[in-house]
Amino acid sequence: QKLAALGQLVAGVAHEINNPLGGVLGHVQLLLAERAPSASDYEALKHIEEGAQRASAVVQNLLRFSVQRKEPVRSAVDLNKLVRDTLSLTESLLRDGHIAIVYALADAKPRARADAGQLAQVLVNLVANARTAMPSGGTLTLATRAGDDGTVAFVVADSGKGIAPEIRERIFEPFFTTKDDWSNVGLGLSVSYRIVEEHGGRIDVQSEPGRGATFTVTLPAA
């Protein structure tokens, strides 16, 4: 009941923010279209656009958490391709943070019956959390595999500070946070959990303090 009430509140707030935010983004993009990159205010407008887009992404996550959505559009998704395509967007950012990326992708090219866009969001959330867990750098391992039970999986493992046992049971709760910066995950893990659950899959986590964390997303095979 508490989560249902929270969901209704979040939905109302997100809709109220989304409309004026869309206006800001639309107008700044019109201004950018009228200017050359050499214009004196071009960089300032780009910063406004980037900030509005980040805020829009937060609003969309809020809506994803709070609104009952239609059935995802599912097809055969190549998990190896999903991992490589998704990581290509954040690879330079990870390397700038002194994070080495290790790929351990299955030769069999496992395919999941899933919505590719939603799985990409799950992967981005898990990678973002892994990056936050390694503020001084480390190793990020991405793996895929096919099981013998009609399932496939992708794995995101980091060499960060790990998850304390008392926190581990709560990390998928909406808005859960602690004083420890790495675990300030907001909606990322709760949204990911919901997406995977809607696909008939599960997310498992293995972690010990000081020994990193491994998240395994298991899904029905295509």
Image (spheres, grey):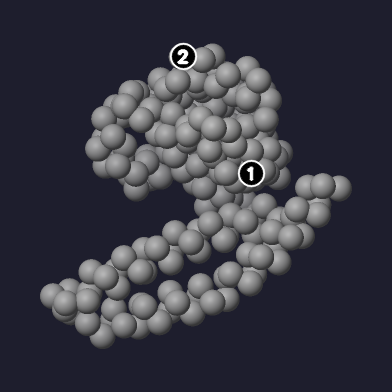
Position of residue 18 measured from the top left corner of the image (x, y, whole percent): 57, 70
Sequence-first tag of 1 and 2? 1
179 relative position to 53: left or right: right
Position of residue 1 measured from the top left corner of the image (x, y, whole percent): 86, 48
169 relative position to 115: left or right: right
Mark 2 closeness class: few <14, some 14–19, many ≥20 residues within 10 Å: some
Cα distance in 3D space between marks 1 and 2: 25 Å
- Reading the image, the residue beneath label 2 is 211
- The reply to whether residue 199 is in sight is no
- Reading the image, the residue beneath label 1 is 175
- The reply to whether residue 18 is in sight is yes
Residue at 38% x, 45% y is 85
Residue kind at label 2, given as amino acid type: Arg
The one nearer the camera, 162 or 206, is: 162
The one nearer the camera, 144 or 158, is: 158
- Which of the 4 image quadrants contains residue 63? bottom right
